[in-house]
């Protein structure tokens, strides 16, 4: 459940009318009492450097650092820094996914060119200018980040706000006192992804949402509500606690009203607490117990959600409104019977998942969370383990809406204030989500999991977590020894891989301990591959254990399904993810463990689980039936089904009917001949389902399938497009590997492509390239006036000139020097002719004329605090050395400690992106299309030499 305050919709419309994202309307508009405003749009981005200050925009190099003096953010942290040459982006943003692959990159992180070996690509800077109206002075204003990877430093208007080491924690800073009301404000963020936090792909940058929160000084604290539910005799007792904080400088008296509203907007019950008073900078918990008759319960099948509306009134005026989404449900574990939701036994059928997706990395649009959760549910998955970190809030929102239970996992075990505070922040943020049933305090902490130190740490963390939320169970995932260390003290013992453990013995030894399998399987497979080809890093997709430390998927599920005391298990993993390409190294860059590939295309084990995890009739055959050159050779054919019996046919000839073992599968050895392989499933002797696999011809046409034909034209929503190659008979060719080119028109854009191939080194994204040409080492010559000609010529010899700004720019200098000519040379790369060039000037004179390669681009322009920019004509620049000349009247120091600007500006080169393309991998690829914010029709076209083109139409609807 989410703590999402009411958004001022009228204001949001006004925000879209300005290039600076945050504009709050005019003073004539009566504001709402709480604003929760997106800060995702309108950022500038550039790569810095891990250790070279000159390449890191000279941050932290001034005489007084931002640690020494308040407001002394320097370099790119300074509000005066000129970021016009930086690339324009919107959030969420993962710069790691934009980088190339490299064998020198971290294998566990997907071999992207980032990290210790790439200091020039491991630091990213973000800047955004926004406006706060004068009417907002006196309000409480904060900036909130859902997550930045990693080691982020944040400044507002040059004021250092703080450092957040973890890339997974949400954090918030109060900024009201630092703001320019009625004027521009600048937020700067430096993220340093040099050091890894996990052992899997983690992305880089501001990859989650950013918000501006505006409230009265008397308000509900951030994540300041807590809703718990108990259900008895068809009546729900809802306990609603709200933390009210007074950040005013005077006492405040107020009343609190709490109302529960159902999904249809009907008010169910209201409670008021009257006559409250808070002193300055004090807080108080206000509690209400509200009774709901005949409640609609939140469950996996029917995820009914309610809203708690908490309002603060002062002098009969509402000054704050806070909305908390929650669900009415009960959970419990039983040491002998497993897990119960709303009193009903539920076998845990879970998957582990990291937070990246093909094409976009960790910067997932919110709608992609829904796509992934729906895909997992289609397999029968009912629990999602957040491996191994707190998730983005939108993932939990999707689980709440769609009916998916969650293990919410802490990043790092420990009992220092840092670790306990991180754990507390996660719980406070996420504790109202009905989907969350367990807090995980750690995963495979090998150094401590079997020791007395681990026992102490786990016991303390578990008790601490329960002091924040006593309604959920605490778990930890253990891969080492069982029966000592952490396993002896944790609420719910998490087994990682029972092939090396005796769960029956543990249950006998600790009969009151709850338990489940937090990781199982860890099988390795390439989608659509049915013979191992180790030279190509391809592994057959038949279910088999990786080695003796693991079980196969079938072995794992049989172990858990046959033991009621085990609540269930979590497959490693649901989706493939970047990094950890076990058992291979370079050039494999993705894991092989998923039941789905990185795009979400099912591998065959998906259908095994669907057969035994759902009530849907399933009949699935593998492999494909394209085996030219193997005529007469035996092919292993498997059927995944939950039917009583399955009969296999080849070219209409029966190869025998076999009885299905519960939680098992069936196999035949079939001599290959081209044609049709068909399986028919029977339940109680009656045909119940079938699957057909046919030999195909070569690819002849392309097919595009969208997961939704209509998306919101809000600049956020997406359509996920499946790309296939089919033969002339319209059969998908399961071995097709054609390269497909994509083009798009209308109010949409491609934001990423993928194909699920663990060895593909193709780009995920095709973006414009932005290069910066800095201009330095100016020389100067004093002249009589601005009307000079020889000194600005391209080939003029300035070797005898002095270095610029050598003389102090005081009044005496101004009396002596009427005008100057500044000159400098600058190098332009050889491919600059393909770029759009812009000169972003910064005044170095009161009045100045600017010449590039002898051509005047600006005539006697006056000093301008807003700065100028000039599009340069094609052909004006040439590869190699170019010259700039500026004829100017001198700038003078305003006072003895002030200086003058000595930077003439920079040249930005913007190279257009290459067209999007992607090879098919075993017949499939994926394109993610996102709205650009306008209504209309989006047309995505796919083309490949020799194949019939295909276009899919997507409607972007009004918001």
Image (tube, rainbow, N blue to C red):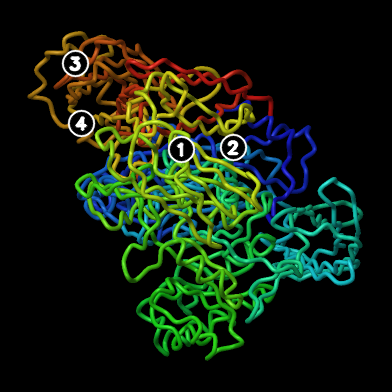
Disc 4 + disc 2, Cβ < 8 Å: no
Nearer to the camera, 681 or 709: 681
Nearer to the camera, 379 or 314: 379
Q: Residue at x 21, y 11 (%)?
A: 854
Which of the 4 image quarters holds residue 491? bottom right
| Foreground: disc 4 or disc 3 | 3
Which of the 4 image quarters holds residue 7? top right
Q: CA distance from mark 4 to mark 2?
A: 36 Å
Is 585 placed left or right of 745 in the picture?
A: left
Disc 2 + disc 1, Cβ < 8 Å: no
In the picture of the structure, the residue carrying the numbered disc 3 is: 878
Q: Horizontal and vertical percent for residue 76?
A: 38, 44
In the picture of the structure, the residue carrying the numbered disc 4 is: 804
Closer to the N terminus: mark 1 or mark 4? Answer: 1
Closer to the N terminus: mark 4 or mark 2? Answer: 2
Circle 4: is it few (<14), some (14-19), or many (20+) Cα within 10 Å?
A: some
In the picture of the structure, the residue carrying the numbered disc 2 is: 131
Whether 193 is drawn above or below 635: the answer is below
Q: CA distance from mark 2 to mark 3?
A: 39 Å
Q: Please give the label number shown on residue 743.
A: none
Quadrant containing the C terminus in the rendered view: top right
In the picture of the structure, the residue carrying the numbered disc 1 is: 653
Total labels drawn:
4
Nearer to the camera, 762 or 632: 632
Whether 470 is drawn above or below 318: the answer is below
Q: Horizontal and vertical percent for residue 12?
A: 68, 34
Q: CA distance from mark 4 to mark 3?
A: 25 Å
Disc 1 + disc 4, Cβ < 8 Å: no
């Amino acid at each position: 459940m989410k703590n999402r305050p009411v958004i001022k919709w009228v204001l949001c419309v006004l925000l879209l009318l300005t290039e600076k994202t945050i504009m709050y309307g005019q003073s004539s508009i009566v504001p709402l009492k709480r604003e929760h405003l997106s800060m995702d749009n309108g950022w500038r981005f550039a790569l810095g450097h891990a250790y070279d200050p000159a390449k890191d925009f000279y941050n932290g190099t001034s005489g007084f650092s931002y640690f020494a003096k308040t407001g002394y953010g320097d370099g790119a942290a300074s509000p005066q820094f000129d970021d016009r040459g930086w690339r324009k982006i919107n959030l969420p943003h993962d710069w790691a996914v934009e980088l190339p692959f490299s064998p020198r990159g971290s294998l566990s992180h997907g071999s992207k060119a980032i990290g210790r070996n790439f200091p020039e690509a491991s630091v990213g800077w973000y800047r955004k200018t926004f406006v706060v109206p004068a009417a907002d002075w006196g309000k409480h204003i904060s900036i909130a980040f859902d997550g930045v990877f990693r080691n982020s430093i944040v400044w507002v208007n040059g004021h250092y706000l703080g450092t957040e080491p973890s890339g997974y924690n949400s954090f918030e800073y109060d900024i009201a006192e630092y703001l320019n009301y009625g004027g521009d404000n600048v937020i700067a963020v430096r993220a340093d992804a040099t050091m890894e936090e996990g052992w899997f792909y983690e992305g880089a940058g501001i990859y989650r949402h950013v918000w501006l929160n505006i409230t009265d000084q008397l308000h509900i604290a951030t994540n300041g509500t807590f809703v718990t539910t108990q259900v008895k005799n068809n009546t729900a007792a809802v306990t609603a606690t709200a933390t009210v904080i007074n950040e005013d400088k005077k006492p405040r008296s107020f009343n609190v009203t709490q109302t529960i509203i159902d999904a249809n907007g009907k008010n169910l019950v209201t409670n008021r607490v009257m006559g409250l008073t808070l002193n300055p900078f004090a807080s108080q918990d206000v509690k209400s117990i509200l009774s709901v008759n005949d409640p609609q319960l939140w469950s996996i099948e029917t995820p009914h959600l309610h809203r708690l509306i908490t309002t603060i009134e002062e002098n009969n005026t509402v000054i704050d409104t806070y909305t908390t989404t929650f669900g009415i449900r009960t959970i419990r574990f039983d040491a002998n019977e497993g897990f119960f939701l709303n009193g009903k036994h539920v076998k845990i059928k879970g998957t582990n998942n990291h937070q990246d997706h093909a094409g976009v990395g960790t910067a997932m649009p919110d709608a992609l969370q829904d796509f992934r959760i729906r895909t997992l549910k289609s397999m029968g998955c009912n629990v999602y383990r957040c491996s191994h970190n707190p998730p983005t809030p939108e993932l939990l929102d999707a689980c709440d809406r769609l009916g998916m239970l969650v293990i919410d996992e802490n990043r790092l075990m420990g009992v220092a204030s840092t670790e306990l505070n991180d754990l507390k922040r996660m719980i406070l943020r996420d504790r109202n989500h009905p989907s969350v049933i367990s807090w995980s305090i750690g995963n495979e902490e090998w150094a401590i999991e079997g020791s007395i130190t681990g026992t102490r740490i786990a016991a303390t963390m578990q008790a601490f977590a329960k002091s924040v939320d006593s309604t959920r169970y605490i778990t930890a995932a253990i891969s080492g020894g069982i029966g000592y260390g952490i396993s002896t003290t944790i609420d719910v013992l998490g087994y990682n891989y029972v092939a090396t453990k005796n769960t029956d013995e543990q249950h006998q030894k600790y009969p009151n301990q709850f338990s489940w399998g937090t990781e199982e399987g860890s099988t390795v497979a390439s989608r659509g591959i049915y013979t191992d080809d180790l030279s190509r890093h391809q592994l057959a997709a038949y279910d088999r254990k990786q080695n003796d430390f693991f079980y196969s998927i079938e072995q794992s599920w049989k172990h858990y399904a046959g033991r009621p005391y085990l609540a269930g298990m979590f497959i490693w993993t649901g989706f493939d993810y970047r990094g950890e390409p076990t058992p291979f190294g370079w050039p494999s860059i993705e894991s092989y463990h998923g039941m789905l590939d990185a795009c979400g295309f099912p591998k065959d084990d998906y259908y095994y689980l669907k057969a035994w995890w759902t009530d849907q009739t399933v009949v699935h055959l593998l492999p494909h039936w394209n085996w030219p050159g193997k005529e007469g050779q035996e092919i292993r054919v498997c059927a995944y089904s939950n039917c009583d019996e399955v009969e296999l046919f080849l070219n209409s000839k029966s190869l025998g009917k076999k009885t299905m073992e519960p939680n098992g599968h069936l196999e035949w050895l079939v001599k290959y001949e081209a044609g049709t392989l068909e399986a028919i499933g029977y339940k109680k002797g009656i045909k119940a389902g079938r699957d057909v696999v046919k030999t195909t011809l070569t690819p002849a046409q392309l097919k595009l399938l969208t997961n939704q034909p209509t998306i919101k034209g809000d600049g956020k929503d997406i359509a996920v497009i499946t790309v296939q190659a089919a033969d002339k008979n319209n059969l998908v060719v399961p071995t097709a590997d054609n390269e497909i080119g994509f083009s798009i028109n209308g109010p949409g854009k491609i934001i990423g492509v993928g194909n699920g191939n663990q060895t593909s080194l193709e780009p995920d994204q095709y973006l414009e390239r932005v290069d910066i040409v800095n201009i330095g080492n100016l020389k100067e010559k004093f002249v009589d006036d601005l009307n000079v000609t020889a000194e600005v010529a391209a080939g003029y010899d300035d070797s005898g000139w002095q270095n610029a700004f050598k003389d102090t720019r005081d009044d005496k200098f101004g009396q002596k020097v009427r005008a100057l000519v500044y000159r400098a040379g600058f190098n332009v790369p050889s491919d600059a002719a393909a770029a759009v060039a812009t000169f972003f000037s910064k005044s170095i004179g009161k009045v100045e004329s600017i010449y590039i390669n002898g051509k005047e681009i600006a005539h006697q322009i006056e000093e301008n605090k807003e700065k100028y920019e000039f599009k340069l004509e094609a052909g004006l620049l040439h590869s190699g050395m170019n010259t700039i000349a500026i004829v100017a009247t001198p700038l003078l120091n305003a006072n003895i400690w002030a200086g003058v600007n000595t930077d003439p500006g920079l040249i930005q080169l913007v190279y257009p992106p290459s067209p999007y393309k992607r090879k098919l991998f075993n017949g499939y690829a994926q394109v993610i299309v996102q709205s650009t914010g306008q209504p209309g029709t989006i047309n995505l076209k796919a083309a490949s030499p020799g194949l019939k083109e295909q276009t899919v139409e997507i409607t972007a609807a009004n918001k």
